[in-house]
Image (cartoon, rainbow, N blue to C red):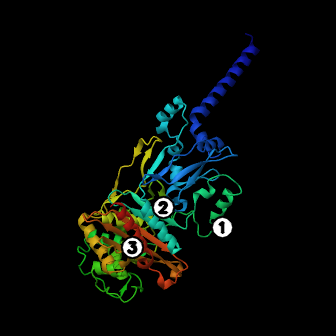
Amino acid sequence: MNKPLRRIAIFCGLLVLTLLIRDNWIQYVQADELRTDKNNRRVIIERYASPRGDIIVDGKPITGSKETSGSDFKWKRTYKDGAMWAPVTGYASQAFGATQLENLEDGILTGNDDRLFFRNTLDMLTGKKQEGGNVVTTLNGAAQKAAYDGLKKQGAKGAVAAIEPSTGKILALASYPSYDPSSFAGNSTTTDTKAWQKLLKKNNPDDPTLNRALRETYPPGSTFKVVTAAAALEDGLYTDADQNTRTPLPWTMPGTTTQLKNEGNIPCKNATLRTALQYSCNTVFGKIGSDLGNEKMLAMAKKFGFTEEQFTPVRANASVFGEDMNPSETALSSIGQFNTAATPLQMAMVSSAIANDGKLMKPYMVDELQARSVDTIEKTEPEELSQPLSSDNAQILQSMMETVVEKGTGTNAKIQGVTVGGKTGTAQHGENNSENPYAWFISYAKGEDGSSPVAVAVVIEDDKAVRDDISGGGLAAPIARNVMEAVINSKK
C-alpha cells in the first residue's frame, strides 16, 4: 500500500474508532442521563403510554387513568377526592411534570422500575402490555377526611398531620386550601394550562399547591412548651409534675429590663409544671429555657427531630431552633416564639414521641410497593429515630398533657371514654404581633391498654377571624378531636 492510501486508511480507521467510542459513550455512560432528561419527549410519552399504577389507601385506589384521544400521550391521570389527597399524592401532569409520591415512585407506577424487570420480561414473552405497580400508603381514609373537612369548614389556611406513635405511620396529611390534580393532568392549552395558571401563587395568594403539612414552618407557640418541659425533666431541673418551680412573678428576662408576660390572670408564680402547662404560663417555661441554656434546649429539640429535613419519602422542611442565642432569646424560643419554627409534621412527631413513652419513630407514608399482580416488591419496616426522653419522664409529661385536656385550655379535645392528652398554642405572627396569630393544637389519644393509636398536630392561620376569637383550643382542638375519633372508630 502506498503512503497516501495508508494515511487515508488510518484516518478512516480513526473516524470509525471515534464513532464507536461516541456510540458506546452514549449507550452506556450517558444512557440514564438522556433517558431521564426532562427535555426528552420520549420519556414523557412512555410515562403516559399505558395506565399508571395506583396509589392505595385502605386497600382502595385514590387514583386512576383515563384514555385520551388526539394526543401522543395515550393515558391521563385521574384522582378521586383529588383536593383532599393532593398533599399525599402530589400530581402527575402531562404538561407540568410530577411531584411527591407521583414523582418519587414514578418507576413503580409506570412499571419501569428495575425491580419489575422479571415481571416485565414475562409480560413481554407472553405478549402482555407492560403495567405499572401500586404504591400502598399508610394513610387512614377516615382520618384524612376528618382532617380535610375540619380545615375546609374553618375556611382558613391550615394543615393537619397525624401519626401512629408506635410505628411512625402517617395516618393523615391534610392542607387547605388545596387543589385538584385532575384539573391539569393533561396537556391542553385551553383547559389544563388555564387551570394551572390559576393555581400559581402570583395569581392566587392563598398558594393552594403549597403542602402546608410538610413544607410550611410556623412559630409553634405554646405547643413547644412540651419540648421545654421534656428538657427540664430529662436534665433533672425538675423531677415531678407537681413540684413547685422556682418562678417569680413578674419575671424579667436575663440581660434585659423586659418582663415576660402571661396571657390573662393565671396562677403562674412558682407554679408546678402541671399547672404551668395547664394554664400555659410563659414565665415558667421561658425561665426553664433560660435556666437550661441554649445548648441543652437545642439538644432536646434535635432529639425530637428539629433542624433536620424529614423524608416520608416526600421531603418535609427542617424545623428550626436557634443556635448561639443569649438567655433572653432562649427564653422566648422555649415558649415557641423568637426564631423557633416547626412544620405540622414536626409537632405531630413531638406529640407521638411523648405518647410512645419517649420513643420517636421515623414518620413514613408508604407502607409497601407492589407489582400489578399485588406481589410485594418492597415493605417499609418501622424505624426508631431517637429517644428524646425516658419512659418515666414521658409518662410524667403525658399526665401533664392529660390535665390540659381534662381541665385546662384543651377541653375541646375531650373524647368520651378515651384518655386524651394535648397542648394548645397561639403563636404570634407578623412584626410586633401585628397580624392574626396562628392557632395550634397537638394531642394524642390512648386506648384502654395504655397504647396510643394516634397523635395529631393542627395549625390554623385565619387572617379573617376576629383576633380575640383565635385560640388553639377554640379553632384547632376540635379538628384534632375529630381526627383522633376517626382513627379510634376505624380500629373497632
Which residue is under mark 1? 203
Residue 261: x and y in percent read 40, 85
Residue found at x 51% / y 33%: 123
Q: Nearer the viewer, mark 3 or mark 1?
A: 1
Identify residue type, mark 2.
Asn
Residue extending furthest toward the bottom: 265
Residue 271: x and y in percent read 28, 83
Up/down of 280 relative to 360, above or below? below
Residue found at x 63% / y 56%: 184
Q: Secondary structure at mark 1?
A: loop
Identify residue type, mark 3.
Thr
Up/down of 12 relative to 27, above or below? above
The crowd level at tag 1 (other Cα within 10 Å; few <14, some 14-19, many 20+) is few
Quadrant of the image occupied by residue 200: bottom right
**In this image, 48 relative to 373: left or right?**
right
In the image, 124 versus 259, the foreground residue is: 124
Residue 299 showing in the rendered view:
no
* Earlier sequence position, callout 3 versus callout 1: 1
**In this image, 327 relative to 271: left or right?**
right
**In this image, 371 relative to 34: left or right?**
left
Residue 16 showing in the rendered view:
yes
For residue 223, the mark is: 3
Quadrant of the image occupied by residue 457: bottom left
Identify residue type, mark 1.
Asn
Q: Are marks 3 and 1 in contact (CB under 8 Å)?
A: no
Q: Secondary structure at mark 2?
A: loop
Residue found at x 52% / y 84%: 466
The crowd level at tag 2 (other Cα within 10 Å; few <14, some 14-19, many 20+) is many
What distance separates the C-alpha of mark 3 from that of mark 2? 19 Å
